[in-house]
Amino acid sequence: MIQIKVPATSANIGSGFDSLGLAVRMYNTVEMELWDGVLVEALDSAPIPTDEHNLIYKTAKYLFDLCGKPLPGLHIRQENVIPMARGLGSSSACIVAGLTGANLLMGEPLTREDIINMAATMEGHPDNSTPAILGGQVTAAIENGKVFYCRQELKDDLRFAAIIPDSELKTSQARAALPKEVTHKEAVFNLSRSALMAVSLATGKYENLRVASQDRLHQPYRLPLIPGARQVMDCALEFGALCVYISGAGSTLMALVPAQNDSFFRHLRCYLDTAGLAAWRLELLEPDNTGTVVEVRP
Ligand code: HSE
């Protein structure tokens, strides 16, 4: 039995649409072994397909087919701690687990770079899948199916407050809300801030994060799809967040908070409870600098 542990990710980091992402210490765990037929077990109450439509199975089968190896079937046990359709990389985690597991079961015909490229191509953009594999903060661009990236460690003086609404937002819906074209001015606004974000996180120049997270490419169009988000973001800043942005395609909002701020969680929880948003979850997460971890069990 192979066990694969994949971290949650937070893509875009505000201004770096489809190019910046980071990993946090919240994990999906998948166990996988060759089986006669398809047997998928959910180890929690997450509503996942338990037949050949399961994303982990489909991804693994795709890789077996690509390598020309017959797949008799798989036994998959999956624990889905990363909430689905909330902008925390749950699909990426399944794709990475499927590719990593299938690769190991076939005797590792693929390199890690192959898996990085394939996961980004399947996902459509590299900003969730690459940090899910490598951990840390990743800046990435994809060209002709190859991911060009830089990875840097996230410092331990930051905490990531995932503010998770009770409603889903499908990536397809969040992408459909985007304009087909933007102006030159808007493009410059974002590229300056996304470059600033990557370097400010690397150097610990956190006073830049508020400006660096500003965005004109996606957040203004997605915010109306998350009722209450604007007010929550304002409160997060008031309670000491360095920046707050829509995580990935949403619906989660991610606030970056100094690790020594010990009142942020209490204040924001209190706000959510009194503002009619008691069903929203608030998770204070540490950075993940490890990425996907595999354990082979006898
Ligand atoms: N960069 C992507 C988006 C992340 O914002 O649509 C979703 O996977």
Image: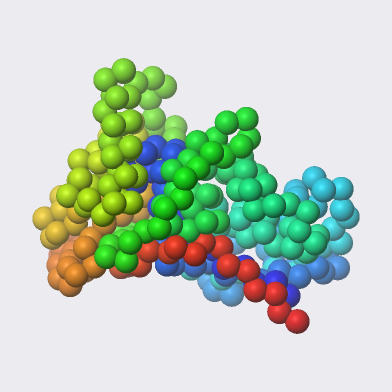
**Residue 209 in the image: above or below residue 146:** below
Q: Quadrant of residue 214?
A: top left
Which residue is painted at 70% across and 74% down in the image? 296
Quarter of the N terminus within the rendering: bottom right
Between residue 207 and residue 228, name the one nearer to us: 207
Report the residue that reaches farthest toward the bottom: 298
Report the residue that reaches farthest toward the front: 203
Asked whether, in this view, residue 41 is left or right of residue 216, the answer is right
Q: Is residue 126 visible?
A: yes
* Residue 12 x/y as whole percent: 38, 43
Report the residue that reaches farthest toward the left: 238
Q: Quadrant of residue 72?
A: bottom right
* Residue 218 x/y as whole percent: 34, 34
Q: Is residue 77 visible?
A: no
Between residue 85 and residue 82, name the one nearer to us: 82
Asked whether, in this view, residue 169 is left or right of residue 65, the answer is left
**Residue 201 in the image: above or below residue 296:** above
Which residue is painted at 80% across and 45% down in the image? 66
Asked whether, in this view, residue 112 is left or right of residue 132, the answer is right
Which residue is painted at 33% across and 61% down in the image? 155
* Residue 91 x/y as whole percent: 55, 53
* Residue 212 x/y as whole percent: 25, 41
Give the colouring mode of the picture.
rainbow
Quarter of the C terminus within the rendering: bottom right
Picture mark count? 0
Which residue is painted at 52% across and 49% down in the image? 130
